[in-house]
Image: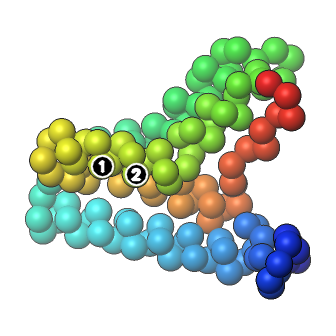
């Protein structure tokens, strides 16, 4: 079902099949590129790439789990989760690493892969609390 917001045509919901298929296609492209680069060009550490695939959940869920009480997320939990599960944060880190090391850090694409697979499976950003 589409969402009507203001002027113009309705927006497609983030859980729609088309939206999820787009993220699935991006995930396949990332996997193919990382694999191709690892096999033929080098510059990709599979262990480091796997670390970056796991990074968003480690950074978000370990502190959230330690601070949660009786199955309730802390108020800041959604902010932390969203900070490491969005493409903007990934892009800032990628550009920063590129500027520092004067070359792209290909294993960082594991982090982007995590985000695109989450969206493919229907996991989006968290709903922020009304009052913090």
- Farthest residue, direction bottom: 9
Above or below, 62 against 35 in this view is: above
Residue tagged 1: 95
| Residue contact at pointers 1 and 2, CB within 8 angstroms | yes
Residue 9 sits in quarter: bottom right
Q: Which mark is residue 37?
A: none
Residue 27, how many percent across, how many down? 47, 67
Above or below, 54 against 36 in this view is: above
In front here: 67 or 48? 67
In front here: 96 or 61? 96
> Which quarter of the rendering shows the C terminus?
top right
Residue at left offset 25%, top offset 53%: 106
Residue tagged 2: 91
In the displayed structure image, the side of residue 27 where residue 45 appears, left or right: left
In the displayed structure image, the side of residue 110 where residue 66 appears, left or right: right
Does residue 44 appear anywhere in the picture? no
Q: CA distance from mark 1 to mark 2?
A: 6 Å
Residue 57, how many percent across, how many down? 56, 37
Residue 121, how many percent across, how many down? 66, 61
């Amino acid at each position: 079902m589409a969402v009507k917001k203001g002027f113009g045509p309705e927006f497609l919901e983030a859980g729609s099949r088309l939206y999820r298929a787009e993220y699935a296609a991006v995930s396949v492209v990332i996997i193919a590129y990382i694999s191709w680069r690892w096999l033929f060009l080098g510059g990709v550490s599979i262990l480091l790439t796997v670390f970056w695939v796991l990074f968003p959940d480690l950074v978000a869920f370990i502190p959230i789990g330690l601070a949660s009480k009786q199955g309730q997320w802390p108020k800041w939990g959604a902010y932390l989760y969203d900070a490491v599960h969005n493409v903007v944060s990934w892009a800032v880190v990628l550009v920063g690493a590129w500027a520092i090391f004067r070359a792209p850090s290909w294993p960082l694409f594991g982090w982007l892969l995590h985000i695109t697979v989450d969206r493919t499976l229907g996991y989006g950003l968290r709903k922020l609390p009304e009052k913090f």
